[in-house]
């Protein structure tokens, strides 16, 4: 959680969310000013698998990691680490842009940050579904 008093609350408050296992799941920002959260982060029922759910996508990869942990952890980090590095690297510029928008129209800044966060959440879901498919093919398809 980041609380930065020098920014308007809508931008200065950021909750960095991970789902399931912080060793695998990337962090994604949800700003205090966000108007909503991506559907994939709202869908989760532990009793019913749902391909649209970010939590299920990450859980699936996390569970597959039990097959060959060190190999699969490296596969996850190869995708997750650049995703997070890009996101953290663009945060200051993104927030400067949001602040300029906020000064003119607070609601447009909130929409901007919501869209940004939603895109990151959607990308995490896609990333882990792709990882799931790669892991199944690479490690469980009668291979050593």
Image: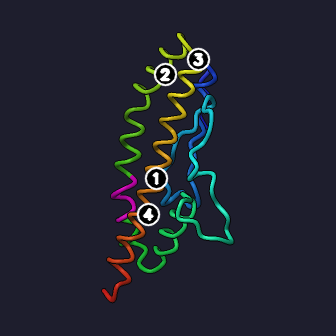
Residue at 64% across / 23% down in the picture? 9
In the picture, the disc for residue 129 is 4
Place of residue 133 in the rendered image (x, y in percent of width and height, measured from the top left): 38, 71
What secondary structure is the magenta-colored segment mainly? helix
Instruction: Classify 10 Å Cα crowding around label 1: few (below 14), some (14-19), many (20 and above).
Output: many
Sequence order check, earlier mark of 3 and 2: 2
Marks 3 and 2 close (CB-CB < 8 Å): no
Place of residue 113 in the rendered image (x, y in percent of width and height, measured from the top left): 52, 30
> Looking at the figure, which quarter contains the C terminus?
bottom left
Instruction: Classify 10 Å Cα crowding around label 4: few (below 14), some (14-19), many (20 and above).
Output: many
Residue on which disc 3 sits:
106
> Looking at the figure, which quarter contains the N terminus?
top right
Q: Which element is circle 3 on? A: helix
Residue on which disc 1 sits:
124
Place of residue 135 in the rendered image (x, y in percent of width and height, measured from the top left): 38, 73
Task: Give the quadrant of residue 55.
Answer: bottom right
Residue on which disc 2 sits:
98
CA distance for labels 4 and 3: 35 Å
Residue at 39% across / 65% down in the picture? 131
CA distance for labels 1 and 4: 9 Å
Sequence order check, earlier mark of 1 and 4: 1
CA distance for labels 2 and 1: 22 Å
Residue at 46% across / 53% down in the picture? 124
Sequence order check, earlier mark of 2 and 1: 2
Marks 2 and 1 close (CB-CB < 8 Å): no
Q: Which residues are magenta?
A: 75-80
Task: Give the quadrant of residue 102.
Answer: top right
In the picture, the disc for residue 139 is none
CA distance for labels 3 and 1: 27 Å
């Amino acid at each position: 959680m980041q609380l930065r008093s020098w920014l308007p609350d809508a931008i200065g408050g950021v909750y960095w969310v991970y789902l399931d296992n912080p060793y695998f799941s990337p962090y994604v920002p949800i700003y205090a000013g966000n108007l909503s959260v991506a559907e994939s982060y709202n869908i989760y029922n532990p009793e019913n698998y749902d391909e649209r759910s970010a939590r299920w996508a990450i859980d699936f990869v996390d569970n597959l990691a039990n097959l060959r942990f060190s190999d699969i952890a490296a596969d996850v980090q190869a995708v997750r680490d650049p995703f997070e590095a890009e996101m953290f690297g663009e945060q200051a510029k993104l927030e400067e842009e949001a602040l300029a928008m906020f000064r003119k129209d607070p609601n447009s800044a909130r929409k901007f940050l919501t869209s940004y966060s939603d895109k990151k959440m959607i990308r995490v879901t896609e990333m882990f579904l792709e990882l799931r498919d790669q892991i199944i093919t690479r490690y469980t398809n009668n291979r050593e």
